[in-house]
Amino acid sequence: MTSPQNDQLTALAAAGFPIDSITQEQRAVYSSLSEDEVTLLIDLRARLDAVEPEVQAHTDIAGSGMF
Amino acid sequence: MSVLAGTRPISSSAGLRMKLGLAAPSLNRAMNAVWKPAGLTERYLDYLSVMHAVIRASVPMMQDAAQRCAALTDDPVAPALAGYLTAHIAEELHHDDWLLQDLAAAGREPALVASALPPVAVARLVGPQYYWVRHHHPISLLGYIAVMEGNSPPPWLSGRLATATGLPSAAFRTLHHHAVADLHHSAEFDAFLDSLPLTVGLQRAISVSALSTADSFTDLLTRLSDPRE
């Protein structure tokens, strides 16, 4: 178990991201996030609460992206 | 490659996927919510209508980005990016028309779908790409592609939806095509990304675009599955 070491990791942890369980590679990448990237991720995290409980319990991931 | 974990460099694609991994819980829940059983038939048709508004921008955005590449002289990534986009344009042509045909097969009037004012959530999803391509660097579009192709429907979904909704198989042509084709596209995308001599700034342009796309697409899907949002 590790603890946040910089502003980016501290902000992600405060938003509820499981920073304590990330790998060394993830720590290196997340420590270099820009302020905009952190802001977007925190915004995304807040959207978790917008999904209904029965959907949250669903485990299969069925994508819906198209390009 | 710009980030080092210990002594081992992290590839551009791996770094991007790690960042998108943080976005995945919210995006995955929003994607799953679109396919929930209650109201599925009507929601599937709404989904096709919304995705028509989204993917009719795919080819024009890539054309704009390719044109910007041509205007960027002495840019280390522009020639390769233009080649990638040009090849991709040929693969994505007319998919918006396919969606209208799918909707027609399901009983919706294509002309009404095509002429409807696109939702604000669609403009918020697609609009930033036009801005970044024109006013920053066309490499930004790769972030959008990473999310929209990287979260394509699984191959089994169209069959399950056909059974659950009772709609004709012709209503699932585009969905099934993307389920199969985008698996190949994502692997091709990662290889291409890792072949580029990306600066830290260009990597960030891609990842900001990708996270913005994930955020806006999550919002779009949430509104689709729960119109009260």
Image: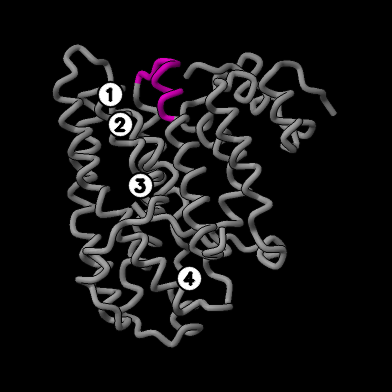
Please report whichever mark, 2 or 4, sits nearer to the chain's N-terminal start. Answer: 2
For the residue pair B106 and B117, the one nearer the viewer reads as B117
Tag 3 near tag 4, CB within 8 Å: no
Task: Quickly name the residue at label 4.
Answer: B157
Measure the alpha-carbon separation of dots 3 and 1. 17 Å
- Asked where in the image residue A26 lies, by quadrant, the reply is top right
Mark 1–mark 2 Cα distance, whole angstroms, equals: 6 Å
- Which region shows up in magenta? B197-206
Q: Which amino acid does label 2 sit on?
A: Tyr
Q: Which residue is drawn at 48% across and 70% down?
A: B157
Question: In this rendering, would A18 be left or right of B110?
Answer: right
List x then y, in percent, for residue B39: 53, 78
Q: Which mark is residue B135?
A: 1
Q: Which mark is residue A22?
A: none
Q: Nearer the viewer, residue A42 or B6?
A: A42
Q: Residue B54, image x and y in percent?
A: 33, 53
- Whichever of labels 4 and 1 marks the residue nearer the N terminus, that label is 1
Q: Mark 2 points at which residue?
A: B131
